Image (spheres, grey):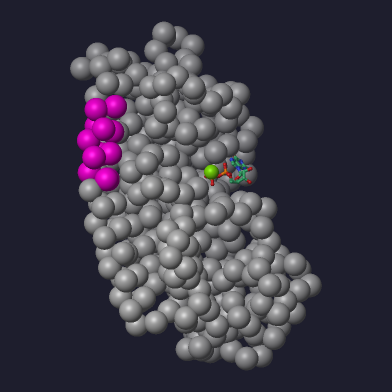
Amino acid sequence: MNLNMFKHFFNKRFLLMGVFPKFFSQEEILVELEEMESLVNTYGGQVFALAVQKGERPSQATYLRSGKIQQANDSILKERIDIVVCKDYLKPGQMFTLEKIFNISNPDIQVWDKAFLILHIFDLHATSAAAKLQIKIASLKHMGPRLYGMGYILSDQGGGIGIKGIGETNTEIMRRHWRNEIYSLKNKIKDLEKKRQIMIDRRQKLGLKTVSIIGYTNSGKSTLFNQLSGKKNTVDDKLFVTLDSTSAKLFFTNSRENAILTDTIGFIRNLPPFLIDTFKSTLMESVHSDIILLLIDAADPDIYNKIQTVEKVAYELNLARDKMIYVFNKTDKSDNSKKDELCEKYKFYTPVFISALTGKGISELKRIIEEKLVKQTVRE
Ligand code: GDP
Ligand code: MG
């Protein structure tokens, strides 16, 4: 079975479209657009054009209203856009219609919605086969008819059921096929989860410690990962096959202890509820970690809200509180006026203040991780 359901596109040029209700302030619109842009960047793309409409309700047929459609088409041509992504969730019909319309400017144009973008990001970051399967299930469930309509899945099964003329019978065949596929994927996941547990047990027996970095998108996780691990060493030992290239060995100075460090996908605000389970499975590795570094952007004016969001996800993931260290990043550009307050409020989580960019506080962080690991070993 082919687990890679998505063809990934890198360095692609995106147009971001959004229709906002009247009561949205300029500020709120900007926040939402920036959030979407950071998702596009997380995926490895870049936003080159916008199509934003205010004071309207989305059109049933084309999401954007007529004036903007023409303008979007012009931008697609001018900016050589590959993918149009909508900040909302689209209906399959809206996607088809839009793709047809935008075809004039780029015959290969793709129209995605927020969920489809997030699923692509998940797929890209999924480290285990189980996570890949969860993503596939989510895609089948929620994009199923759309994917079939686009001739994605069945095309590799032959049979010629694809983009053209989906009749009543074919639709029924597809539905049945789709349901069967979800069922068999679920069974496969159960098997994989058993195997994963065996792997985790084995690592534990060998005394291999794991540290993972979690946090909001853009908080600096990857920067910290590189800073802590020095060179970006990929681990090629057979035991680590479930970890992908975002894992590296972490060495300490004072003890012979070492650990596996894992970078994770960022938390996403307003994650659509139907994607939460999928999201959890891409973060499963961190659930089993010995230490969880919760990274927070200290320069963020909205810091308390962000921490709350992250804490909520951590709670839903059942992450153990006593494994967590709160790491406040970007202290090079924050005014640090909240430092004392943050220290007091989160003292349970051994707060550390760092700059992943300049390296400030990194050796202190390493020392704290090491201490915590040694303590855990003693307790065991
Ligand atoms: P991730 O999405 O959490 O993996 O975040 P990245 O590591 O990709 O970083 C997001 C952005 O924040 C990048 O532009 C980094 O250069 C920047 N960044 C990360 N750490 C720091 C820091 O300590 N100080 C400053 N000023 N910028 C940082
Ligand atoms: Mg990252």
Disc count in the image?
Answer: 0
In-image side of 121 versus 1 (left or right):
right
Question: Ligand 1 lies in which image quarter?
Answer: top right
Q: Who's the residue at 56% across and 76% down the image?
A: 18
Residue 134 location (% of width, % of height): 33, 51
Residue 375 vs residue 223, the one in the foreground:
223
Q: Tell me the magenta residue range.
A: 188-199
Magenta region, main secondary structure: helix
Of the 4 image quadrants, the one containing the C terminus is top left
Single out the residue that lies furthest toward the front. Answer: 159
Instruction: Find out whether residue 79 is within the magenta segment.
Output: no
Q: Nearer the viewer, residue 200 or 21?
A: 200
Residue 337 percent across, percent down from the top left: 52, 45
Q: Is residue 41 visible?
A: no
Q: Is residue 39 above or below residue 379?
A: below
Query: Magenta segment: does it hold 197?
Result: yes
Q: Tell me the quarter of the picture where residue 378 sits.
A: top left
The answer to whether one can see residue 2 in this image is yes
Residue depicted at 35% across the width and 37% down the height: 285
Residue 173: x, y in percent? 32, 71
Specify whether 77 is left or right of 174. right
Q: Residue 292 location, x and y as percent?
A: 37, 34
